[in-house]
Image (spheres, grey):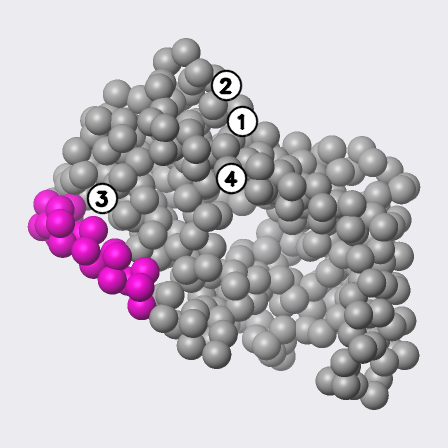
Amino acid sequence: MAKIAKFALLALGLYILYVTVRSVGIGTISSQIVELKWKLAPLLFIYPFIFAFDTLGWSYAFPKGPPNAIPFRDLYAIRIIGETLNAVIPWAASLGGEPIKAELLKRKHGIPLSEGLASLLIVHTTFWVSLNLFVIGGLLVTLNTIKLTPVLWQSVIIFLIVLGLAALLLVIGLHLGIFKQIYSLGENYKWWGQESLEKKNRFLHLDAQIKIFYTSDRKRFFFSTFYNFLGWLTGTLEVYWIAKILGMNVSLAEAWLLEALIQVLRIATFFIPSSIGAQEGGIVLILMQFGYDKSIGATFAIIRRLREILWLGIGLVLWSLIEDRPKLKGTAI
């Protein structure tokens, strides 16, 4: 049932994309992109830095500290593969690549599965905390220059409250030992299986790994959050450059706010695989709120999507080169 719902949402997203592009005209969008030519080249060099900061954020989320035994390029490649699978597996709620990251760390570098999974859970908390800070920062730097419409204000405030609470509850839950509670709950169900003792040990070990992170050196939480924040901030440069080559009169501060709003849109539409259609339609609506023509918004959105497709292609190539690839169904705890 869940898979059917995901494919239905994907179909809905594709329909929204079709309507958005049709309302502007594929010829108009393509001609604008063709005219840009070499001006698109800098976008090829910005996103690798975004990904590098995000990878650094992940490296500091490991319970026992940054895994120095793993070359940074390998950690970078594993993250690309995982994020690619997050985007292309339509039934996994944008999380299908996470257990694959942990499995690749184990197979290629001997990182215990519990430690790899713990790092992924922890980095999601620092990811959310840094995103909250990034969105708040975007609002503050444009407070006296841009007047958001009531709809945008309400949407952003709701987003900050929901994401902030989710991040706080997850941090508290992980600190207190959430997996012990999950195991206790699972014991009440027959489907929990015959390997309950083994599962209990795995769950408790995962709790122990996470506990190490939150009690041994809290500086790592700061650095993980800090590098994730730098990743968001670097994304501002991408928005700024796209806006400039499209002739939009946008400052760096305004580009910060635009990127913050786009990320709010992506998180809010996570249930649609890769936010396909919803991202494009949302960007058009956001830019129209700022007084730009919908053709500019559609071209902006398509350029962003083309960059994503390029990196998805890189991720799929890297995935195809791995011998004895883990199963896409994921890895059990």
Which amino acid type is shown beneath numbered disc 2? Leu
Between discs 4 and 2, the one toward the N terminus: 2
Q: Position of residue 129 (x, y in %)?
A: 64, 37
SS class of the residue under badge 4? helix
Give the dominant element type of the magenta stretch: helix, strand or loop. helix
The residue that disc 1 covers is 136
Residue 311 seen in render: no
Instruction: Name the front one of labels 1 and 4.
Output: 4
Which amino acid type is shown beneath numbered disc 3? Ala
Label ID, residue 159: 4
SS class of the residue under badge 2? helix
The residue that disc 2 covers is 140
Between discs 3 and 2, the one toward the N terminus: 2
Magenta segment, which residues?
A: 11-29
Tell me whether circle 1 and circle 4 mark residues in contact (CB < 8 Å).
no
Separation (CA) of disc 4 from disc 3? 24 Å
Between discs 4 and 3, the one toward the N terminus: 4
SS class of the residue under badge 1? helix
Q: Position of residue 272 (x, y in %)?
A: 41, 60
SS class of the residue under badge 3? helix
Between discs 1 and 4, the one toward the N terminus: 1
Which amino acid type is shown beneath numbered disc 4? Phe
The residue that disc 3 covers is 298
Q: Measuring 71% from the left and 49% from the top, which residue is drawn there?
A: 170
Left or right of 81: which side holds 60?
Answer: right
Q: Position of residue 324 (x, y in %)?
A: 62, 79
Which amino acid type is shown beneath numbered disc 1? Ile
